[in-house]
Image (cartoon, rainbow, N blue to C red):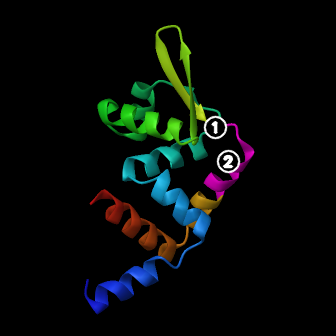
Amino acid sequence: MTNQDDMAARLMDDMDPKLLEFLRTKVNSFIKWDLVRFFHDNPHTTDTAENIARYAGRDPRTIESELIELTRSGVLEMQQVSNYKVYTLATDAEMRALIDRFILACDDRQFRVKAIYHVIRGMK
């Protein structure tokens, strides 16, 4: 790692530790980021992966695995309704507050640049 790379890493790590952890462990892909924003903006949505994909403008095959991971990490909840899995935003107050903080922070350009950096770095 060059000195310049080290400096960039230090600048990018200068972020609220809870939000950094949220990015690294829960919203570690751009699809998950889109899904978190979708559920934040539509907190009463309970729907199938196929319909969520349509609303989010994504491919249903790629959405399903990301929805499952978000469920495992506590961001979403999944229920079986008849033969369908439906997803909804977690009801946990702490998780919802963290999601609110993340989405609010995304309004800041510097935060978004840092968040994008961490998502890309995590994809390697």
Amino acid type, mark 2: Arg
Whether residue 10 is situated above or below residue 22 in the rendered picture: below
Q: Residue at x 58, y 41 (%)?
A: 74
Quadrant in the picture for residue 21:
bottom right
Q: Quadrant of the C terminus?
A: bottom left
Quadrant in the picture for residue 108:
bottom right
- Classify mark 1: residues with Cα within 10 Å, few (<14), some (14-19) or many (20+): some
Picture coordinates of residue 119, whole percent (x, y): 38, 61
Residue under label 2, please give it: 96
Q: Give the Cα separation between the discs numbered 1 and 2.
A: 7 Å
Q: Residue at x 48, y 74 (%)?
A: 109
Which one is nearer the viewer's eye here, 57 or 122? 122
Magenta highlight range: 90-100
- Is residue 72 in view? yes
Residue 25 is labelled as: none
Residue farthest to the bottom? Answer: 3
Q: Quadrant of the N terminus?
A: bottom left
Mark 1–mark 2 CB contact (< 8 Å): yes
Q: Residue at x 43, y 47 (%)?
A: 32
Amino acid type, mark 1: Ala
Residue 23 on the magenta segment: no
Whether residue 64 is situated above or below residue 41 in the rendered picture: above
Picture coordinates of residue 46, whole percent (x, y): 58, 27
Which badge, 1 or 2, is on the more N-terminal residue?
1
- Is residue 106 in view? no
SS for tag 2? helix
Residue under label 1, please give it: 90
SS for tag 1? loop
Residue 93 on the magenta segment: yes
Label the magenta part by its dominant secondary structure.
Answer: helix
